[in-house]
Each structure stands twice: as C-alpha cells, then as structure tokens.
Amino acid sequence: MSRLDERRVHGLRVAIDRDLCVGFGDCVEEAPDAFRLDDANVAVFVGPAAVDRAALLRACDACPVDAITVYDETGTQIVP
Ligand code: SF4
C-alpha cells in the first residue's frame, strides 16, 4: 500500500498518512466503523461512509500525530 490511503466520503477527501500513523488507535476508538488497525498496527479505512460526517471528522481530528488529513468540497484543509 502506498504511503497515503485516501477516500472520498460525504464530499470530503480523507487521507491517512501511513508513515505518520503510530497506531495509537484514537481514530479507531472514535469511529470503529470507519477505521481499524491493520496487521502492521497502522490505520486503514473500513467503511467511512457508514459514519456520519460529524463523527467522521471527530475521529479524524482525534489523531494525536495528525496522520489523518481532511479536505472539504472546496479543497480547503479542515483537519487538522
Ligand atoms: S489516531 Fe492517528 S496514529 Fe492513531 S491509529 Fe489513527 S491515524 Fe494512526
């Protein structure tokens, strides 16, 4: 898998930087339907569309090392 794992969901572009992720799991705790930890203990997407937009943003914002970046419909970075 490449360094960046990206999904478009709820009009947002969500990117996990797999090099930055240190596997704390805060995002998984906040939204286990959106994220999980893989065998390398790095965050990957599960089904982010299943989580409502506000909850997804909270989960992305919970990352202590800013490994998850979110851009809105206009391309503006809104997380972190
Ligand atoms: S909160 Fe950040 S560091 Fe922790 S698992 Fe999620 S992406 Fe990785």
Image (tube, rainbow, N blue to C red):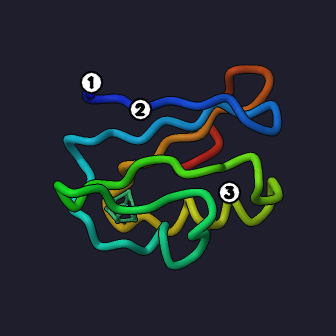
Ligand 1 within 8 Å, label 1 CB? no
**Which is more N-terminal, label 3 or label 2?**
2
Determine whether label 2 and label 1 are within 8 Å by CB.
yes
- Tell me what residue is drawn at x 17 percent, y 55 percent: 40
- Tell me what residue is drawn at x 75 percent, y 46 percent: 49
Counting labels gives 3
Q: Which mark is residue 5?
A: 2
Q: Amino acid at mark 1?
A: Ser
Q: Which mark is residue 16?
A: none
User: Which percent across, then down, holds residue 72?
Assistant: 74, 32
Alpha carbon of mark 3 to alpha carbon of mark 1: how far?
23 Å
Give the labeled residue for mark 1. Answer: 2
Residue furthest front in the image: 39
User: Which percent across, then down, holds residue 34?
Assistant: 60, 57
Give the labeled residue for mark 3. Answer: 57
Q: Bin the neighbour count of mark 1 within 10 Å (Cα to Cα): few under 14, some 14-19, many 20 and up.
A: few
Locate ligand 1 by image quadrant.
bottom left
- Tell me what residue is drawn at x 80 percent, y 53 percent: 53
User: Which percent across, then down, holds residue 2?
Assistant: 27, 24
Determine whether label 3 and label 1 are within 8 Å by CB.
no
**Which is more N-terminal, label 1 or label 3?**
1
Q: Bin the neighbour count of mark 2 within 10 Å (Cα to Cα): few under 14, some 14-19, many 20 and up.
A: some
In this rendering, position of residue 61 left or right of residue 13? left
Alpha carbon of mark 2 to alpha carbon of mark 1: how far?
7 Å
User: Which percent across, then down, holds residue 27?
Assistant: 49, 67
Point out the frontmost of discs 3 and 1.
1
- Tell me what residue is drawn at x 59 percent, y 65 percent: 59
Determine whether label 2 and label 3 are within 8 Å by CB.
no
Q: Amino acid at mark 3?
A: Leu
SS label for mark 1: loop
Considering depth in this image, is 71 or 21 the residue closer to the camera? 21
SS label for mark 3: helix
